[in-house]
Image: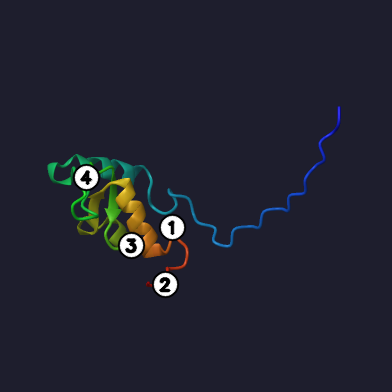
Amino acid sequence: MPRRIPCHRPPRPARADTRPSAAARGYDWRWQKYARMYLKRPDNVLCRITPGCNRPATLVDHIVPHKGDYQLFWDPDNHQPGCKPCHDRKTALEDGGFGRCPQRPR
């Protein structure tokens, strides 16, 4: 039986932007408990990120990105209920695609 020729795979480059874990960024058990309680409130049942979106809220969004600011992270006035598709779209537009350089305006 013929042997398969090994293919050359160059080593993966190390990520230049090593991002801390979610827990290290503040999304620990306290945040998870807070988010569950926040989403149980009657006025936080539907997504409010995109006007007209009537999907059920599944996560809590920071209206203004906190960028590590502890006070802004826990400020209840900076939170809004959202669904994952709207949150992902908003994050991609703000951060330029999940943490990459911001996109140029078209």
The mark nearer the N terminus, 1 or 3, is 3
Q: Which mark is residue 98?
A: 1
Q: Look at label 1 and name its amino acid.
A: Phe
Q: In the image, residue 22 lies at what x, y percent?
A: 43, 49
In front of the other: 42 or 1: 1
Q: Which mark is residue 65?
A: 3
- Residue 67 visible (yes or no): no
The mark nearer the N terminus, 2 or 1, is 1
Quadrant location of the C terminus in the rendered image: bottom left
Residue farthest to the left? Answer: 42
The residue at the point 23 percent across, 55 percent down is: 50
Quadrant location of the N terminus in the rendered image: top right
Task: Give the spatial CA distance, label 3 vs label 4.
Answer: 18 Å
Q: Look at label 2 and name its amino acid.
A: Arg
Task: Give the spatial CA distance, label 2 vs label 1.
Answer: 15 Å
Q: Residue 104 carries which label?
A: 2
Task: Give the spatial CA distance, label 4 vs label 1.
Answer: 24 Å
The residue at the point 67 percent across, 54 percent down is: 12
Q: Do the residues labelled 2 and 1 touch (CB within 8 Å)?
A: no
